[in-house]
Image (tube, rainbow, N blue to C red):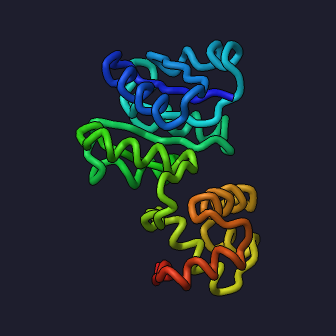
Amino acid sequence: MAIYVIEDHPLMRDAIAMLLRRIRPGAEIAELGQLSELDAAIALHGAPKLFCLDLKLPDAGGLTGVRRLATQYPDVPLMVISATPASEAEEWCREAGADVYVEKSVDAAVISDALRRILDVDDDDEPLEQPKLSKRQKQLLVMLDQGLSNREIAERLEISEHTVKVHLWRLFRRLGVKSRTQALHYARKHGLLMNP
């Protein structure tokens, strides 16, 4: 398995790869300048373990790349590292399927911390900060608390049951749980249940 850094700026690409090598020595890291290189890179380096994606690539601007990776590789964590302020793009990226959003302007330590969290690498066994949930994920928690089935959630949100399952899977992964019961227990314990 390999970690794929998809970033068109060579210096930033090298910096992210360097941070990854410090966090995961010996990891296979593939550095790509654009999204169109991904299929060939996967054939060469193997299945993806993590994607680190720039939001503005020459061949996939905006949310195009996020949606493509989230659709093609729904089980692979996706971290967006962008020059766009989080206030302008983070929620959209999360809705499109990103698991983590980090601004390029932050310190290297902040990026390293985000990489450790998404790769499940804990240096000190310190409690991790609360996960940031998208508006849809907060809605799902409220509906789970109301005891709605996947079909009832699908009807209320006017989406397919399959899409509900995908949203729930992403919610469970974000919370680090494996079931509805665990998700609700976590949400109650951490004060995540809010009115939609």
Q: Is residue 90 above or below residue 32?
A: below
Q: Is residue 130 left or right of residue 106?
A: right
Tell me which residue sits at (49%, 80%) in the image: 190
Q: Is residue 25 above or below residue 97?
A: above
Tell me which residue sits at (63%, 82%) in the image: 185
- State whether residue 96 appears in this view: no
Which residue, as the protein is rendered here, is positioned at the far front?
124
Residue 83, x across and y down, in percent: 27, 36
Residue 106, x across and y down, in percent: 25, 43
Q: Quadrant of residue 27?
A: top right
- State whether residue 128 appears in this view: yes
- The foreground one among 86 and 157 is 86
Number of numbered discs visible in the structure rendering: 0
Tell me which residue sits at (67%, 66%) in the image: 177
Q: Is residue 4 left or right of residue 108?
A: right
Q: Quadrant of residue 36?
A: top right
Q: Is residue 79 above or below residue 146?
A: above
- The foreground one among 148 and 187 is 187
Residue 80, x across and y down, in percent: 43, 40
Q: Is residue 86 above or below residue 43?
A: below
Residue 79, x across and y down, in percent: 48, 41
